[in-house]
Image (cartoon, rainbow, N blue to C red):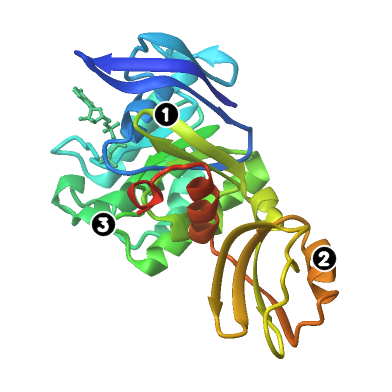
Amino acid sequence: MIEVKNLSKSFGKFKALDDLSVHVKKGSVYGLLGPNGAGKTTLIKHIVGVYRQDEGVVTVGGALVYENPTVKSTIVYIPDDLYFFSQYSIAEMAKFYASLYPTWNQERYECLKKVFPIDDKRRVTKLSKGMQKQVAFWLGICIMPQVMILDEPVDGLDPVMRKKVWNLMLQDVVERETTILVSSHNLRELEDVCDHVGILHNGKIVAERELDNMKSDIHKLQVAFPNKVPKDFLKEVEVLHRSESGNVLLLIVKGDKEELLSIIQKSNPVILDALPLTLEEIFIYELGGMGYDIENIII
Ligand SMILES: Nc1ncnc2c1ncn2[C@@H]1O[C@H](COP(=O)(O)OP(=O)(O)OP(=O)(O)O)[C@@H](O)[C@H]1O
């Protein structure tokens, strides 16, 4: 749905994006991660057609985005710094969007008054930061977009509202195959909602993974032996990380879980447990193995 091919962008002599490619499938939720200044917002501004690329191609639904109002009308962009007309109430903003977007759904707008408990006669710019974010989602969801691009989306929302907003968006992913690209620093939050994750570092995508594949391919095992740890018992196993405390070993290993367990079982451990891995741990070990200074990439 979103195709970015060999995209480069410089600001003066500074190369913010460097031959970067990203592919986001229709109906998926793609998490874009990376440290401050990695280029996330710059990439997003190309995807929503604000910036013109120096090199490369950016398409949404197969069509070039830049200077293409038809494609842009299918995309909702919720930036970190929101903009509303200073004199408009929520209802007036809704009316404005209804005139702009042919897909505007007034019934949904009325229905979502139950979810967003704000009087829609209030002026948007007089609301708190978190309430303005709620309004952005309320209006954005009513546009019935094909693509939602979210930059630090739930920043400022309270935990209950975060959950409600994600539930609404994920319902659209399931029912309408809405595609979501979300930029965030928060791996733990993305872990719950994304099916793909890409890590951006110094203007390049350094890793791109499908979460289910990733989780089935890397495991944390706790192993203990009655006496000494036998030599060579990990000969046939790809070990990404190993720490040892007495006779107990903590291993991060790659491969099929059942196969790994049966290999290790042959050495007769007294304890052999597979423990769940967080997304953060997966990236730390995967990217660490690729030679990246992971502390600087994952926050
Ligand atoms: N309009 C601009 N003019 C000059 N430099 C820019 C401009 N926009 C972005 N940059 C530079 O490009 C780099 C990438 O910025 P960008 O805002 O895309 O990073 P980011 O990953 O979104 O960071 P953050 O997580 O802090 O929001 C930074 O070094 C930034 O200073």
- Label 2 sits on residue: 258
Report if the beta carbon of the residue with label 2 is closer than 8 angstroms to ligand 1. Answer: no
Q: Which circle, 1 or 3, is nearer the viewer?
A: 1
- Image quadrant for the N terminus? top right
**In the rendered image, is residue 144 in sight?**
no
Seen in the picture, residue 224 relative to 102 is either above or below; the reply is below
In-front residue for pair 221/208 = 221
Please tell me which residue is depicted at 27% across the width and 39% down the height of the picture: 92
Please tell me which residue is depicted at 38% across the width and 29% down the height of the picture: 44
Rendered image: mark on residue 130 = 3
Which three-letter amino acid code belongs to the residue tagged 3? Gly
Please tell me which residue is depicted at 58% across the width and 38% down the height of the picture: 178
Report the side of 221 relative to 115 (left or right). Answer: right
Q: Which circle, 1 or 2, is nearer the viewer?
A: 2
User: Which quadrant of the figure has residue 116?
Assistant: bottom left
Q: Separation of disc 2 and disc 3 at Cα?
A: 46 Å
**In the rendered image, is residue 43 in sight?**
yes
Seen in the picture, residue 24 relative to 186 is either above or below; the reply is above
* Quadrant of ligand 1 in image: top left
Q: Residues within 10 Å of mark 3 (few under 14, many from 20)?
A: some
Look at the numbered discs 2 and 3 and tell me whether their residues touch, using CB distance below 8 Å. no
Which three-letter amino acid code belongs to the residue tagged 2? Glu
- Label 1 sits on residue: 204
Sooner in the amino-acid sequence: mark 2 or mark 3: 3
Provide the secondary structure element on which disc 2 rests. helix
Residue 289, x across and y down, in percent? 53, 47
Q: Residues within 10 Å of mark 2 (few under 14, many from 20)?
A: few
Provide the secondary structure element on which disc 3 rests. helix
In-front residue for pair 53/175 = 53
Sooner in the amino-acid sequence: mark 1 or mark 2: 1
